[in-house]
Amino acid sequence: MLLLSVTDDTYDAYGTYDELKLYTSAVQRWDASAMDELPDYMKPLYRALLNVYDEVERDLAKQGRAYGVHHSKEAFKEIVRSYEIEAEWFKEGYVASFEEYMKNALVTSTGRLHTTSCFMGLEADVATIEAFEWILTKPKMVAASGAIGRLVDDEEQERGHVATGLDCYMKQHGVSKQEAIVELYKMIENAWRDINEEMLKPTAISMKLLIRVLNLSRISDVVYKYVDGYTHPEIIKDHVISLFEDPIPM
């Protein structure tokens, strides 16, 4: 989460387009030698990225399940490619169609990365190779979780960066902001229906894994539904306290 947050900010607010292309290329190579081609301010972030994954891979290799790290790395590579697409859109002043925006946003919403990274922390008999391969099939539940994560956060984005899904929808369909918001909330509701459907029918993976995808969706709903609680964590302080310091007795 920390690495992804700093990477996101680098693409959104700090790197020039040419510098970001270098960083994207370095992540695709995933090799320490690529650091020589990066601006000095990017090198600590790239070094940290490689080091964290190396540490996790060593730990999981001792348990005979380092296979999950490969999937998480590939998801991280995919995200930075999509971040670069957003940077290019911003550079060109391009407003994508809503469909084009969502195709890219389902990657930047981090659903695949967070799901694979979450699975890495589970027991080997639950987070099997088949479970990681299930994610690669782009199952409806993971897509729905990503859509919720992006759309509940979308309306309140005021970062002065690439056009949001709200902007794209308004331009493409010629509707007001309020009309577009109504339509986006319908999409969020439909995504929740997809998740409920997937939770109720038999699937190829354990319910212990599906619960993790569900919980990632719940996090998005709590943190972003009304305000951006990630950028302004003081807003969700009471939620954190009620969960960790003063939980309801079960």
Image: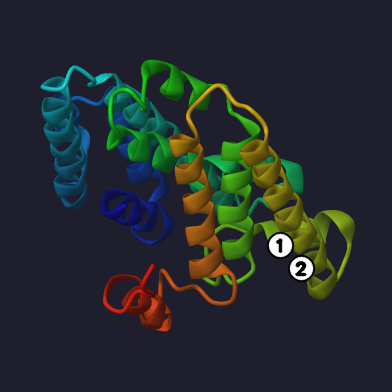
Q: Which residue is mark 2?
A: 181
Q: Residue at x 56, y 38 (%)?
A: 142
Toward the viewer: 217 or 171? 217
Q: Residue at x 17, y 34 (%)?
A: 56
Q: Which residue is mark 1?
A: 166
Left or right: residue 22 compared with residue 208: left
Give amino acid for label 1: Leu
Q: Residue at x 50, y 25 (%)?
A: 205
Q: CA distance from mark 2 to mark 1?
A: 7 Å
Quarter holding the C terminus?
bottom left
Q: Among all residues in the image, which is located at the extreme front? A: 250
Give amino acid for label 2: Ile
Toward the viewer: 63 or 4? 63
- Label 1: how many residues lie within 10 Å, few (<14), some (14-19) or many (20+)? many
Closer to the N terminus: mark 2 or mark 1?
1
Residue 37 position within the rendered picture, expressed as x and y whole percent measured from the top left: 20, 33
User: Label 1 near label 2: C-beta < 8 Å?
Assistant: yes
Instruction: Establish if 102 lies above or below 68.
Output: below
* Element at label 1: helix
Q: Quadrant of residue 66?
A: top left
